Image (cartoon, grey):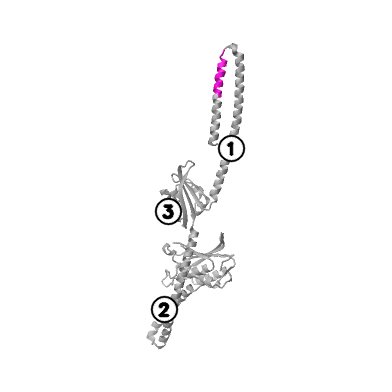
């Protein structure tokens, strides 16, 4: 029942009480009057009683009308509340409200999904018991934040980028009754932005690499020629040294070839390829001598994909080789696929996971850069070339790593733009 109806109902009830009070007084006065006026008094009392009954009847009718209005108002309020609840649960952004003691009073479905929590388990809980830093720090400060981007770790260890706003929650009279947090998962957008920046950097470095490789190729050819000439004229005591020079020259030649491979524009030879067969062949060639590697494969039912079989085989082999090398004492190599759809189209995701030592956070953003390597004899071009191959097929590559292992995720459009 709203305020206006309560006022009307109270006013009518007050009038009825006042009339009833005066009627009782009149009835008492007439009842105690003189007998000679008894007939007249009885007539007057009857008139008053009839009037009272008529008034009571009208009041009951008004009460019924008020009850109908009250029920309509309640139904309307419930409909509005349900509509608002539907809006809250349908928005893609996460929304969490808190009371003045910073206990959670409401969380929509997007908030549950993004932050990996259950609504029924968090309602009434203090924010520090459910959320982590830096969100808890922002809530404690009770500042108005119009727009901020933060890095946040979910309970499962997943690292997210969140864009959020934080503002006071007020009632209809403008009084602050808590806080409201609205946030959006920017992780995918950040990954795309990072991929675009990396692509630009790789393009510049590729041009530099081409120049370096060509400049080195000429003197390397001269060294190879003199080494062969020297090997024919030198005595046996110098031949070990000459062989060592030849080996180092071969290593340098392989590095230069990698430079050129990275710098050369990707020219794809497109055909229909069987991903399952390519992956199985790559696994066989890499793990043939490693009996201590356990394989978990879920690559059945893959669609036929258009791409360059040679380049994709090179990329898969490189990633599988890295995974195996990350498990020198044995472990589990897991390769799986899944399909998903978003606003940009249909995608196939291939994941390659190991149970090795993982990649530390301070170098994870550098692994696709040319010449960056943690291996003693690596050139630092392997993953850069992998990145280039995946991107040339219209795909993207991401990496997740912890001390329990590393997962590379390759995403390809089902109908890639190549």
Q: Which residue lies furthest to the top in this view?
A: 36
Over which residues does the magenta segment extend?
A: 19-33
The quadrant where residue 57 appears: top right
The CA span between labels 3 and 2 is: 51 Å
Circle count: 3
Mark 2: give few (<14), some (14-19) or many (20+) Cα within 10 Å.
few
Q: Name the residue under label 2.
A: 248
Identify the disc placed on residue 71. Answer: 1
The quadrant where residue 48 appears: top right
Do callouts 1 and 2 mark residues in contact (Cβ within 8 Å)? no
Q: How far from the left and from the top, in percent, is residue 262? A: 48, 72
Q: Which of marks 3 and 2 is in front?
A: 3
Residue 363 lies left or right of residue 339; in this view the side is left
Q: Could you tell me which residue is drawn at 49 percent across and 59 percent down? A: 189
Q: How far from the left and from the top, in percent, is residue 347? A: 56, 63
Mark 1: give few (<14), some (14-19) or many (20+) Cα within 10 Å.
few
Q: Which of 288 and 374 is in front in this view?
A: 374
Residue 214 showing in the rendered view: yes
Could you tell me what secondary structure mostly forms the magenta stretch? helix
Q: Is mark 2 on a helix, strand or loop?
A: helix
Q: Could you tell me which residue is drawn at 55 percent across and 27 percent down? A: 15
Please report whichever mark, 3 or 1, sits nearer to the chain's N-terminal start: 1
The CA span between labels 3 and 1 is: 46 Å
Q: Which of marks 3 and 1 is in front?
A: 1
Q: Which of marks 1 and 2 is in front?
A: 1
Quarter of the image where the C terminus is located: bottom right
Q: Mark 3 points at which residue?
A: 134
Q: How far from the left and from the top, in percent, is residue 19? A: 56, 24
Above or below for 160 versus 327: above
């Amino acid at each position: 029942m709203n305020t206006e109806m309560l006022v009307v109902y109270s006013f009518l009830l007050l009038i009825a009480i006042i009339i009833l009070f005066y009627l009782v007084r009149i009835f008492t006065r007439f009842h105690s009057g003189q007998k000679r006026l008894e007939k007249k008094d009885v007539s007057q009392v009857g008139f008053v009683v009839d009037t009272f009954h008529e008034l009571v009847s009208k009041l009951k009718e008004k009460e019924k009308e008020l009850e109908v209005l009250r029920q309509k108002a309640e139904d309307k309020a419930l409909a509005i509340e349900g509509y608002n609840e539907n809006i809250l649960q349908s928005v893609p952004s996460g929304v969490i409200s808190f009371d003045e003691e910073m206990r959670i009073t409401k969380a929509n479905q997007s908030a549950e999904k993004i932050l990996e929590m259950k609504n029924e388990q968090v309602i009434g809980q203090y924010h520090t018991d459910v959320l982590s830093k830096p969100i808890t720090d922002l809530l404690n400060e009770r500042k108005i934040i119009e727009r901020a981007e933060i890095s946040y770790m979910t309970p499962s260890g997943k690292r997210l980028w969140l864009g959020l706003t934080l503002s006071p929650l007020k009632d209809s009279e403008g009084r602050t009754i808590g806080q409201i947090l609205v946030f959006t998962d920017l992780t995918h957008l950040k990954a795309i932005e990072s991929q675009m920046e990396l692509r630009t950097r790789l393009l510049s470095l590729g041009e530099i690499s081409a120049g370096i490789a060509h400049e080195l190729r000429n003197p390397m050819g001269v060294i190879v020629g003199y080494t062969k000439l020297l090997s024919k004229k030198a005595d046996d005591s110098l031949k070990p040294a000459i062989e060592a020079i030849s080996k180092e020259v071969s290593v340098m030649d392989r590095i230069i070839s990698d430079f050129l491979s990275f710098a050369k524009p990707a020219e794809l030879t497109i055909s229909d390829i069987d991903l399952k067969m390519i992956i199985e062949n790559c696994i066989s060639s890499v793990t043939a001598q490693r009996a201590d590697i356990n394989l978990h494969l879920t690559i059945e039912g893959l669609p036929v994909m258009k791409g360059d079989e040679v380049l994709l085989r090179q990329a898969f082999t490189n990633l599988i080789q890295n995974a195996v090398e990350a498990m020198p004492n044995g472990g589990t190599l897991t390769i799986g696929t899944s399909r998903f759809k978003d606003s940009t189209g249909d995608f196939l995701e291939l994941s390659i996971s190991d149970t090795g030592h993982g990649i530390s956070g301070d170098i994870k953003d550098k692994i696709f850069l040319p010449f960056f390597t943690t291996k003693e004899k690596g050139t630092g071009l392997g993953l850069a070339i992998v990145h280039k191959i995946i991107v040339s097929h219209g795909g993207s590559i991401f990496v997740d790593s912890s001390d329990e292992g590393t997962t590379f995720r390759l995403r390809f459009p089902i109908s890639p733009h190549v």
